[in-house]
Image (spheres, coloured by chain):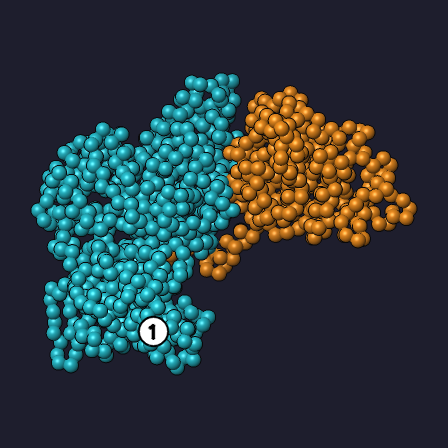
Amino acid sequence: MTSQVSSPAEQADEASEALVGGQRAPRSDHAGAGEKEIRRLDRVIIRFAGDSGDGMQLTGDRFTSETASFGNDLSTLPNFPAEIRAPAGTLPGVSSFQLHFADHDILTPGDAPNVLVAMNPAALKANIGDVPRGAEIIVNTDEFTKRPMAKVGYATSPLEDGSLQAYSVHPVPLTTLTIEALKEFGLSRKEAERSKNMFALGLLSWMYHRPTEGTEAFLRAKFAKKPQIAEANVAAFRAGWNFGETTEDFAVSYEVAPASQAFPAGRYRNISGNLALSYGLIAASRQADLPLYLGSYPITPASDILHELSRHKNFGVRTFQAEDEIAGIGAALGAAFGGSLAVTTTSGPGVALKSETIGLAVSLELPLLVIDIQRGGPSTGLPTKTEQADLLQAMYGRNGEAPVPVVAPRTPADCFDAALDAARIALTYRTPVFLLSDGYLANGSEPWKIPQAEELPDLRVRFATGPNHELADGTAVFWPYKRDPHTLARPWAVPGTPGLEHRIGGIEKQDGSGNISYDPANHDLMVRTRQAKIDGIEVPDLEVDDPDGARTLVLGWGSTYGPITAAVRRLRASGQPIAQAHLRNLNPFPKNLGEVLGHYDKVIVPEMNLGQLATLIRAKYLVDAHSYNQVNGMPFKAEQLATALKEAIDA
Amino acid sequence: MPDTNELLHLVPKAEAKQSMKDFKSDQEVRWCPGCGDYAVLAAVQGFMPELGLAKENIVFVSGIGCSSRFPYYMNTYGMHSIHGRAPAIATGLASSRRDLSVWVVTGDGDALSIGGNHLIHALRRNVNLKILLFNNRIYGLTKGQYSPTSEVGKITKSTPMGSLDAPFNPVSLAIGAEASFVARTIDSDRKHLTSVLRAAADHPGTALVEIYQNCNIFNDGAFEALKDKERAQDAVIRLEHGQPILFGTDHTKGVVRDPDTGDLQVVTVTDDNRSRVLVHDAHNPSPTTAFALSRLADPDTLHQTPIGVLRDIDRPVYDTLMAEQLDTAVEQHGKGDLAALLAGNDTWTVTG
């Protein structure tokens, strides 16, 4: 649960543990003779790793669902290659899914796994460096034969040469056991083998006392058209569970109690960032009472929003898969002209292609949501990895003075609220708005308190219905660029409204009438007015979390919220005061930002780029902000960030 | 083939009788004196009252170029957008607002060069758009570079030694892009232009109308062969649905199918071959003959240029299909229930 600024009374749990592996066992209940021991843990980090065709993402998703419905707090980190099926058994082909779950409030998917499930030698080799000594490793021994090991450079078997002595290794012939369990089903060896991920899921589900009904129901629904395959998967899943229950190698199982203290009362579900964002858009359309129109072109990691919205046509949602990125936003802008709540979804390379149309939207002053699920760049970069290096592109990546508001969610569930906020700004101020999510938020998931309809903001808009201006001769006319004096928004007159026929375009317009104007003074006025409109957008003040009166502020934006907050907790638990603030609105900045910055001796800005927010802060507020940067395609690790913050404080 | 577009019924009718004046905006028209665009503007403004649609439900969307200033002069809703993107923008508008009559105004550079991708995809989807492609075979607004419809060897500022690339034939291109309606007309022939506009307006789906338009500054006389009374007899093939394809002085020339190759050829009509002269069928589902007709024109001299409606077939319209999917989704799943959507199937409750 990471959607609120950490309270002063937050748990400092993530700080109380140095980076060591093994499963902490605060309490231990020894069961009676003949029964297996059950240990209670307060949190666990599991990583499933295998070939990209092994179904690791599905396995992780299912374990997440089981964990969510059990009531733990959780945070996930899927990590997969851009290739759909990279060469089997190779290091680049390894796909993994890390899940952190706890009996209390947690903020990140965890730095280092307590348990690694390695489906083949490549998965072991690619992940062992992240696994702390003492951790448990479950390996599929069937894959540790000469060729697969040679493929990744193991001269001798790591299972036999003593190189894994520091770990608690569970060698399990997952493939053989799965095939054995499914022999009644009359499947080919290859077909049967495919269920080995469900065997592994069953084993882990036993180890951590996860509920199983959800997964069985899921499998039956997923393979509804192939009941034999459905039952085979259920059988493999159960066989994995029973294997844990009966085999002596697994002497202990673990319980992680529901995180009942961490959550306010209410109804919860698990949700990923892209799903929350999709729901936020549908909710915004409902709250605005405008039909939703998505113009989009498939691109990783944004495509899931296109997929999700395409499933909800019964909400009046129109989704248009365009011929290219430019047409995606073009169609959205056309729909905005017609009175839809218009959206385009993309990632960094797509934003580059859409830039000219965003500039047109700035000039037309029509509401339009531009959703950028950032990924590693430049160019094609790292399509499946995360980064937050599009901030300056969103701020400035257009010709001319073309200011666009920027909103950034901080956690997966927060994508819902961010979508509603972006829609509010777009509709109120008649402007394109950037929403900057990223691959980490998009694919990661966490528990979400399901909002009630009455908690959602009222986003209804008023279209223009009649003339708004009187000419000198007394004629009542409609002026498309006569602004609301408070918001500076222009009227939105949609086609079909009699008497308000008007023409708008990308050429500079006369203030008020909107007619073409090349007048120098008018252009100066229009440029400044468009800027003033964006500068005047109402955004909430920045909240600072500073229980100890610190002298150093750590300022973040977007998806770094979880790791920064976890690092801050660690520092505070070790007696180091530090203040924390996290920006939702990057353009305009909150009105009190300058004052907040001025209050601290030091400002540290951790970013998954080379210092883009820091650049903005330094330029705008003349503050000597220090950057801490990481651009390796992965989110910050809490421990590493805590160390960096500490060094910056002491420097 | 229905005579009137049933989709037009979704667009509200004008309450009072309209005149050409109703469609003129208060903006001064700023094309060069003598530009062919004036004639097209007058023809469109003169034809609009015939449609009898509420003018607030008519939208003109354009890209960039001389012709793309068109929307400013129409007293309807309008958007002068960016280079090449008008078909994409109009697609979003038309597919979200079926009560609108959406027109795209574009040029040969706008539609066929920078916006070529959007044009072919609009045609393939069959969005309910009427696209007026003003083809003057030159870039006017940027002052005279060659365009994708310029003849090979064109001497311009950017091609002082002559252009190297073969031109597009917009009609061939449109037919190849699965267009359901393709026509060609000429700016100076008001009657023909109006008849083609009428046919386009009546067509459900995307209608592409190529209008040969004279740029008297940078490419004057580009279509003179088709306009000069004497020469036009042999240069222009006037197509009319259901009529034999005859042209030339006293209709002495005709189009027949070569029995050996299947291709079309022009012959001097005699009593022996008169029965072989093709009868134009714009509604033929197969695009083959329409395409072959489009290829009769010589790209350099424009001799044997077919004008009129080359193709006009019935094909499902994108916006209609999109709306039907929304209706089907409601029938199958009921009207969207936001609370149920947000909750999903897997929830748990925390009690305080």
Relative to residue B145, is residue A600 drawn left or right?
left
- Residue at (18, 72) in percent of width and height: A252
- Residue at (62, 37) in percent of width and height: B165
- Compared to residue B187, the image places residue B198 above or below, namely below
Relative to residue B88, is residue A365 drawn left or right?
left
- Compared to residue B334, the image places residue A565 above or below, namely above
For mark 1, give the secondary structure.
helix
Between residue B6 and residue A584, name the one nearer to us.
Answer: A584
Residue, far left = A575
- Compared to residue A364, the image places residue B327 above or below, namely below
Q: Chain letter for orange?
A: B
Relative to residue B152, is residue A552 drawn left or right?
left
**Residue A36 location (% of width, % of height):** 17, 76
Instruction: Report the residue marked by disc 1.
Output: A175
For chain A, what colour was chosen?
Answer: cyan
Which chain is mark 1 on? Answer: A
**Residue A401 location (% of width, % of height):** 39, 28
- Res A2 seen here: yes
**Residue A208 location (% of width, % of height):** 22, 68
**Residue A450 location (% of width, % of height):** 30, 55
